[in-house]
Structure formats: structure tokens, C-alpha cells
Image: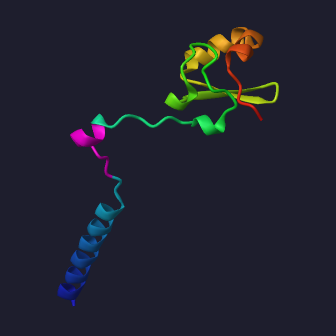
């Protein structure tokens, strides 16, 4: 009887160890994954401006941040550009090259 209990315990522990391996999240640390550029958080279709109002970069080149101002969603290439816009939003709004609605 003891032998049966020992065998059942070993099988149970082996099964538990196997299921833990399947549930682990493995990071892709390959060179190919490391060389892939990060995707922008927002697309030009999501915002009302065609250019970053602070630096003039085209919105289609990639946007990392947005702000809602006077009924418009304005996209920015970086947090720094967003911060610059917030210092004088009226000036930035004219530089945003807003899309026609």
C-alpha cells in the first residue's frame, strides 16, 4: 500500500511541475525582437491634427500622446511636445493644421 501511495505522489508532483511550465510567460529576448521598433500608441486617424503643433512633425509619422482641447483631439509625437502645447494651447491650435470635418 505504501508503494502505491509513493508512486501516486510522484506522479502527482510530476504533473504539477509540468503544468507550471506551461503557465509560465516567456519573454522573447531574441535579437529579432529587440531590433523591432516600438509601435506608436495612436494613429493619425485617431486625431484631428495633421501635424504635431509643437514641432511640426506629420501625425502620420507616429504619435505617442494626445490631449483634448476645445472639442479637438490633438496628437503629439512626444510628451515634451504635449507639454509645450499646454503652455500656450491657442498658439499651438493654429499650428496643428487641423483636418477638415
Residue 30 falls left or right of residue 72 = left
Which residue is at a point 21% across and 88% down the rendered structure image? 4
Please say whether residue 30 is one of the residues in the magenta stretch. yes
Residue pictured at 29% horizontal, 46% vertical: 28
Instruction: Judge whether 52 appears above or below 2 on screen.
Output: above
Q: Position of residue 63 (x, y in %)?
A: 55, 29
Query: Height in image: 32 above or below 21?
Result: above
Q: Is residue 26 above or below residue 38?
A: below
Q: Residue at x 35, y 53 (%)?
A: 25
Q: Is residue 85 magenta?
A: no
Q: How is the image coloured?
A: rainbow
Residue 86 image-quadrant placement? top right
**Image-based side of 66 in relation to 77, left or right:** right
* Residue 39 point in image, percent of width and height: 45, 37
Give the number of callouts.
0
Outermost residue, front direction? 100
Quadrant occupied by the C terminus? top right
Q: Nearer the viewer, residue 14 or 77?
A: 77
Q: Residue furthest bottom?
A: 1
Query: Which quadrant would the N terminus be assigned to in this image?
Result: bottom left
Along the viewing direction, whichever of 7 and 31 lies nearer the viewer: 31
Seen from this angle, which residue lies furthest left?
A: 3
Q: Read off the magenta span.
A: 26-34
Q: Position of residue 73 (x, y in %)?
A: 71, 30
- Residue 89, given in percent of the width and then of the height, sits at 74, 13
- The residue drawn where x is 73% and y is 17% is 93
The image quarter in which residue 72 lies:
top right
Amino acid at each position: 500500500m505504501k508503494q502505491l501511495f509513493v508512486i501516486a505522489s510522484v506522479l502527482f508532483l510530476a504533473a504539477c511541475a509540468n503544468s507550471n511550465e506551461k503557465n509560465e510567460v516567456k519573454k522573447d529576448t531574441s535579437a529579432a525582437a529587440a531590433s523591432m521598433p516600438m509601435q506608436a500608441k495612436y494613429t493619425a486617424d485617431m486625431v484631428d491634427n495633421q501635424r504635431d503643433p509643437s514641432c511640426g512633425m506629420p501625425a502620420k509619422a507616429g504619435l505617442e500622446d494626445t490631449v483634448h482641447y476645445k472639442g479637438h483631439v490633438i496628437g503629439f509625437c512626444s510628451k515634451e511636445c504635449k507639454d509645450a502645447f499646454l503652455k500656450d494651447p491657442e498658439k499651438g491650435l493654429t499650428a496643428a493644421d487641423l483636418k477638415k470635418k
